[in-house]
Amino acid sequence: MSIIVLILIVETALCIILLLSWIRNKKKQAAYKAREAEITDFQLFCLNILDNMPFPVLVKDINDDFKYKFWNKEAELQSGKKQSEVLGHSDIDIFGEERGLRYRKIDEQLVKDKKEYRSEEDYLTPDGVLHKTIVSKSVVSLGNDHWLLIARWDITKIKEYEQELIQAKEKLENVIKTQDLVLNSINFGLVYVDKNYVVQWESTASLNNIAKGRRYIAGKVCYETVMGRQSPCPHCALSDTVEKGKPVRHEITEGDTTIEISAIPVYSNDGSEMLGGLMKLEDISDKKRIEHLLYEVKKADEANQLKSAFLANMSHEIRTPLNAIVGFSNLLAETDDPEEKKEFVHIITSNNELLLQLINDIIDMSKIEAGTLDFNYSDTDINLLMEDLCQQMQLKNQRPDSVKIEFVQKQPECIIHTDQNRVMQVMINFMTNAMKFTEQGSITFGYEKSEKEIYFFVKDTGIGIPAEKKDKVFERFVKLNTFVQGTGLGLPICAMIIEKFGGIIGVDSKEGEGSTFWFRLPI
């Protein structure tokens, strides 16, 4: 608006100078009669331009009591006063003493200060409509003659548009403030970059405590300000989505904090061009903790159900050998047949061993859970330990004709510092399980020793374990086969013992082809 006003002022000033020149020349007609005909047409042309300007143009003669010398058509239209009523009269004559003196005071001060006057003024037209205007006044001199050039521009519409723009700006600022408040109150950040990785927009204030020192700055390349790199970050969700044009999701865990980083490509409206990528960074630590707690609750509920099933099974397992011991003890007292006595004694002894093993398992489980399970370390000859195990298992083998038990893999000499009773306990449990589920074939066992660890294994040709049940064999209170004697405590106790050793336990199995139970102990 100011440029247009300036241009109009310049054009008006030029025309006014010509007008004033004409007024001055009018006074000197006698001296310039020869030129009058030559310049009159041009001066009339300039007067017509001023007279038809789309805004009021006025000229006051400073030397003649500020009387009006020019009053164009737009001034007539806006003021309702004809040229004949105005020319040759002052503001006091036209508008009355109060209003006229106010105008005179401004004019005199302007002439005194020799400065241009410009001000916004309200102007009431004869139709009663109030207009917003800009009034410009300046002194124009030609020799000893001085005039006051006045122009008035109606800016009512411009003011209305300006007010609408101000209101629109305020609304936009309020929307932005509300948006910032919302974004700053949530626990995730948003970053939008173009396809050259220049940050166009970001809201990451909520992540300052998480990503200290990392800043996404509008107008800057993200990988330079965030990671101090000269090229896109490898394995970055944002670079992946920009390069591949597909949504990408990553999780990063640092200490107790887990950040989910997801990015999606942003395309043009017609979908023909990828413009960049929008990345969301969210702290999902609480979500992960809740998921973990829900998992633990579910696991505890399952364990509670398993424990109930275990207690029911335990009562059955205890009653079975007790009933056998009591029943066959009574029969033993009543029979005189030596063969029957021998058979009854064997049955009673077997059930005593079974009951003793059951009680020992329960005690071990209680000690492990209470953290009071003892380990007594000493130098142990592994070859002697395995030979002793082989003899024990061969004596307990109830299918010697169909199942062969062998100690197949060893070293010439192997002495390690460990708790031989706990190692033997785990191996006996592995062997006992193998004998339960192997009806023909072989049960072989042994070890391999390296500089840092020793590896033990028991391999059988039994029924094997289904793939979907392999992960459950070391869980407490779990029995994969309810038709076989046992409490389901043996393998979990083995897992806990190996864990206390700082080792690893596992099983390799294929249903119908046998299993290999193993564990590794650090040396």
Image: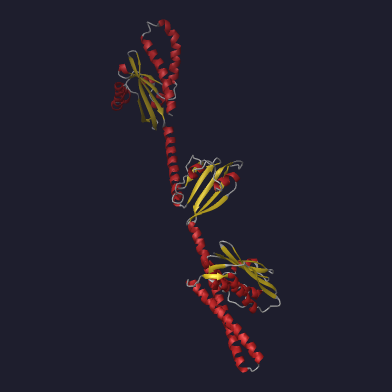
Above or below, 80 against 358 in this view is: above
Above or below, 4 against 511 in this view is: above
In this rendered view, identify the residue nearer to me: 235 or 293.
235
In this rendered view, identify the residue nearer to me: 67 or 501.
501
In this rendered view, identify the residue nearer to me: 95 or 523.
523
- Residue 145 relative to residue 430: left or right: left
Colouring rule applied to residues:
secondary structure
- Residue 46 relative to residue 496: left or right: left
x, y (%) of residue 353? Answer: 58, 81
- Residue 34 relative to residue 404: left or right: left
Tell me, yes or no, if residue 36 can be seen here: yes
Q: In which quarter of the image is residue 459?
A: bottom right
User: In the orientation shown, which residue stands out farthest toward the front?
Assistant: 412
Above or below, 447 against 208 in this view is: below
> Which quadrant, please, contains the C terminus?
bottom right
x, y (%) of residue 155? Answer: 41, 31
Above or below, 38 against 132 in this view is: above
* Total labels drawn: 0
- Residue 509 relative to residue 212: left or right: right
> Which quadrant, please, contains the N terminus?
top left
Tell me, yes or no, if residue 462 can be seen here: no
x, y (%) of residue 217? Answer: 47, 42
x, y (%) of residue 404? Answer: 68, 74
Q: In which quarter of the image is residue 169?
A: top left
